[in-house]
Image (tube, coloured by chain):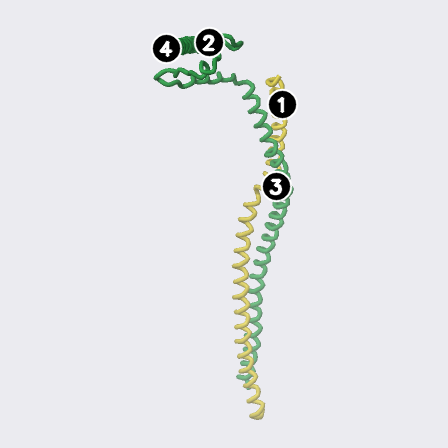
């Protein structure tokens, strides 16, 4: 019977001791976890206070940046207008001379064939570039008429 | 003490040892889970510390907004200046 009593006491003591040890251990770990969670809560509060600045700040920057971006093309246009107004204008390119054939200008008989005399016209300009051509044309026309008259007289005589 | 009582007492002592072992096992499991929680709390703390370091520079955002406002004000001054110069150049 004494053995049974001792064993009973041992079982009860083991149960109590095991519960005490394990619960103390668990309590210690939970206490440490609680301290860590408290630090994490401080960090979260700090992050929240930092993040509260992001929204209004970014919105402000976005709004102001949009105004700046919208105004820059206007500034560019004004600056280009100033540059265009200040820069001296380059001389206009000369019109190249009309290409003429190397063989010279071909004589025209159209005016003479219809009896047109440019010297009687108001547009006649003897100093112009075509005056020599006009004179030659008239000379040839007169010769042609004279030859035609000579041939007609010969025909009448014959 | 008759044999029946003796047998019952012995049985109760055996059951008591089994209960002690079971309690020890369950408390060991509890300790294991608490240690896992402890490790994950450490991970969360490290992540929050990194996040706090990242968000610590957000105090510069209002300063940047003030700087952008200054840029806008300077741009308006440029606009006025270019407007005056452009009027003189065109005239």
> Does mark 3 fall on the same chain as mark 1?
no
Residue B46 in the image: state x and y as whole percent.
53, 52
- Give percent across and percent down for residue A29: 56, 61
The label on residue B83 is 1
- Crowding at dot 1, Cα within 10 Å, few <14 / some 14-19 / many 20+, comes out as some
Query: Chain ID for label 4?
Result: A
Taking the image as shown, residue B32 lies to the left or right of residue A101, namely: right
Front position among marks 1 and 4: 4
Q: Is residue A140 left or right of residue B15?
A: left
Say whether residue B4 is visible.
yes
Tag 2 secondary structure? loop
Label 2 marks which chain's residue?
Answer: A
Q: Quote the CA–CA distance across marks 2 and 4.
A: 46 Å
Q: Is residue A55 above or below residue B41?
A: above
- Residue ID for mark 4: A158
Question: Among the chains, which one is green?
Answer: A
Q: What is the CA distance from the residue labelled 2 to the residue labelled 3?
A: 78 Å
Considering the numbered disc 3 on the image, is that residue within a helix, a strand or a loop? helix
Which residue appears at 57% of the width and 84% of the height?
A: B12
Q: Which chain is yellow?
A: B
Q: How many other residues sit within 10 Å of disc 2, few (<14), some (14-19) or many (≥20)?
A: few
Question: For residue A73, which quarter of the picture?
Answer: top right
Determine if residue A136 is in view: no
Pointer 2 residue: A128
Which of the two discs, 1 and 3, sits closer to the camera? 1
Which is more foreground, mark 2 or mark 1?
A: 2
Compared with A18, A72 (above or below) is above
């Amino acid at each position: 019977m004494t053995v049974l009593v001792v064993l009973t006491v041992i079982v009860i003591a083991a149960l109590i001791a095991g519960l005490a040890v394990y619960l103390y251990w668990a309590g210690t770990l939970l206490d440490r976890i609680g301290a860590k969670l408290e630090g994490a809560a401080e960090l979260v509060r700090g992050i929240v206070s930092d993040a509260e600045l992001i929204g209004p700040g970014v919105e402000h920057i976005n709004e102001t940046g949009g105004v700046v971006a919208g105004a820059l093309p206007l500034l560019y246009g004004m600056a280009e207008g100033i540059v265009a107004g200040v820069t001296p204008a380059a001389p206009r390119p000369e019109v190249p001379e009309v290409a003429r054939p190397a063989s010279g200008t071909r004589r025209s008989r159209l005016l003479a064939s219809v009896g047109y005399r440019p010297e009687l016209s108001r547009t006649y300009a003897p100093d112009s570039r075509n005056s020599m051509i006009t004179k030659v044309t008239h000379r040839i026309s007169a010769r042609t008429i004279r030859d035609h008259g000579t041939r007609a007289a010969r025909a009448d005589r014959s | 003490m008759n044999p029946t009582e003796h047998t019952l007492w012995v049985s109760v002592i055996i059951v008591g040892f089994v209960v002690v072992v079971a309690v020890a096992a369950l408390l060991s499991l509890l300790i294991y889970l608490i240690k896992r929680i402890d490790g994950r709390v450490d991970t969360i703390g490290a992540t929050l510390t990194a996040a706090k370091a990242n968000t610590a520079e957000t105090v510069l955002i209002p300063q940047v907004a003030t700087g952008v406002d200054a840029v806008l004000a300077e741009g308006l001054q440029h606009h006025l200046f270019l407007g005056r110069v452009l009027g003189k150049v065109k005239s």
